[in-house]
Image (cartoon, rainbow, N blue to C red):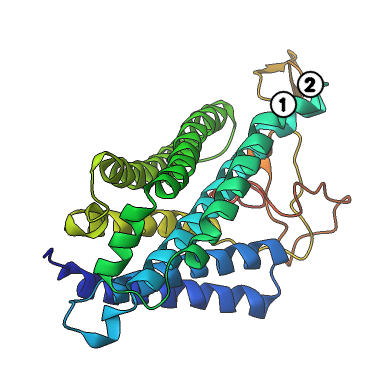
Amino acid sequence: MCTTAPATALLVLEAITAVVVAWRVAYHVRIGSHWRRTTLHLVLLLACIGRLVFWLGLREDDDTTAAHGFAIGLGLLCVAWAATYVCVTEVVVQWSTALAAGRVSHGQPACANVGAHSLVALNALHAMTLVVCPILLPRNASRVETLRFLDAHSAAVRSIAIVHIATGVANAIATTVVGAQLQGRVGASTLRHKDRSQRMTVLFTLSLVLALGLDLGFLLTLAVRSSADALVCASHAIPMIFVSGLLVTTTFLYLMRRLLPKTPARLVTSPIETARCDAGSSQCYLSGRQTSNILHSYALEDDAAPSPPPIAIMGHPTAIFMSDVRRGHVV
């Protein structure tokens, strides 16, 4: 028998995480935040609840309350994975949109975002595949009964695992590429404290990639084992699930911490080339082409002066992690 002692501690930690996410959901509902942001926080809360039920099902076999809840917990863990990947995809899409804003404005083809659209389609397929897992699994089955069921339907389990692993690899690659490009855009910008912004961008990228890597490492280990018992019998695999979910949850909450304004963010068109000054003149002008640098977007504050109609980027500010970009600090 494999030990599930860590499940009790992880159950408490997951409950704390779920309470924090629920508080953020209530906060965004109370302030009337954008419906998309509120919905994404609800998706994140769904992931926490799914893992919470999974930890309940992993309690000791002599606990009669959890003895027949393992199948339900396993099915909701699959739903939690789908919800987590939705949140990761949202971050990648926002970063990709930020990078594409300037390129599209200069006549680049609109297909520059084909990669992001493909990623969304792949994650939609992934979500639809994993959401049906609670329906396919037997109800009120113990751990042993559930694992026997998985062994008897190894082909279906392998197909679902392939979809999940392929989506995880695609998300990891997209996060790495887009994060590296965004880090370069921050370095080329005129933001104040851009060194800190670059470090934060690297930190966010590494956090998401590490979370996906832990998830994939756990599933690949499961795939090469001949028995589905590997799903729970490796004690180190249990913390891997928790750490992966915690990294995504923490990163997502930090990126989405900014208060959304009633109107969308305003894009400040700013050049990234060097400035030239005429002799005897106090005025300087910037050489090079103008680019709509999304890194110079900022949320209009309540006491801001009236401004021209804002340019909406997917309905809300895309530079969601630039806490150092403040009104009056934009060059």
Q: Which residue is more in the foreground, 71 or 107?
A: 71
Asked which quadrant contains residue 43, the reply is bottom right
Disc 1 on helix, strand or loop? helix
- The answer to whether the residue labelled 2 contacts the one labelled 1, judged by CB atoms less than 8 Å apart, is yes
At 50% from the left and 78% from the top, the residue drawn is 23
Cα separation between marks 2 and 1:
7 Å
Closer mark to the observer between disc 2 and disc 1: 1
At 88% from the left and 51% from the top, the residue drawn is 309
Q: How crowded is mark 1: few (under 14 residues within 10 Å), some or many (20 or more)?
A: some
Residue 331 is at least partly visible in this image: no
Image coords of residue 291 (percent x, y) = 74, 27
Q: Which amino acid does label 1 sit on?
A: Ala
Which residue is the site of mark 1? Answer: 112
| Residue 313 shown left or right of residue 31 in the figure | right
Q: Which residue is more in the foreground, 213 or 195?
A: 213
Which residue is the site of mark 2? Answer: 108
Disc 2 on helix, strand or loop? loop
At 42% from the left and 75% from the top, the residue drawn is 139
